[in-house]
Image (tube, rainbow, N blue to C red):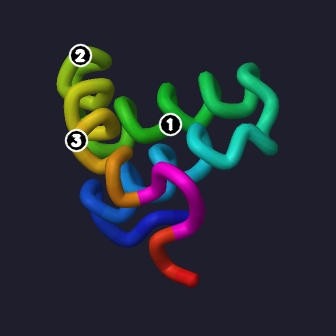
Amino acid sequence: MAQSYREATYDLARSEESGSIPPDVLDEERARIIAEFGVTAEQLSADVDAARPNFIGGDAWG
């Protein structure tokens, strides 16, 4: 589980870019982040989109 909202958005962006996680699981993760951090779906989407360039073409962490 993510320690911070920023970490959660980066984890979600990485998961979306990997394509290895089923869409229904990603939807559950989005709902969890929204509930845990009290953000709107629109804000989460914008923040994930902002993090996405870090992961296009591979995992930025390794």
Number of other residues with Cα within 10 Å of mark 2, as a class: few under 14, some 14 to 19, many 20 or more: few
Q: Give the SS element for disc 3.
A: helix
The label number, if any, that marks residue 42 in the structure image: 2
Residue 45 sits above or below residue 10 on the image = above
Q: Position of residue 3 (x, y in %)?
A: 38, 71
**Mark count:** 3
Q: Are marks 1 and 3 in contact (CB under 8 Å)?
A: no
Q: Residue furthest bottom?
A: 62
**Which residue type carries mark 1?**
Arg
Between disc 1 and disc 2, the foreground one is 2
Distance from the alpha carbon under mark 1 to that under mark 2: 14 Å
Marks 1/3: CA distance? 19 Å
| The quarter of the displayed image where residue 20 is located | top right
Closer to the N terminus: mark 1 or mark 3? Answer: 1
Against 50, residue 56 (above or below) is: below
Q: Amino acid at mark 2?
A: Glu
Residue nearest the observer in this picture, 22 or 50? 50
- 39 sits left or right of 1 in the view: left
Nearest to N terminus: mark 1 or mark 2: 1
Q: What residue is drawn where x is 64% and y is 31%?
A: 26
Q: Which residue is mark 1?
A: 32
Q: Which residues are magenta?
A: 55-59
Does the magenta stretch mainly form a helix, a strand or a loop? Answer: loop
Residue under the image location 49 percent in, 57 percent down: 11
Q: Is residue 39 above or below residue 57?
A: above
Q: Dot 3 corresponds to which residue?
A: 50
Query: Is label 2 in a helix, a strand or a loop?
Result: helix
Kindly identify the amino acid type of the residue bearing the numbered disc 3: Ala
Q: Quadrant of the N terminus?
A: bottom right
Which image quadrant is residue 34 in? top left
User: Which residue shows up at 72% across the image and 38% down it?
Assistant: 19
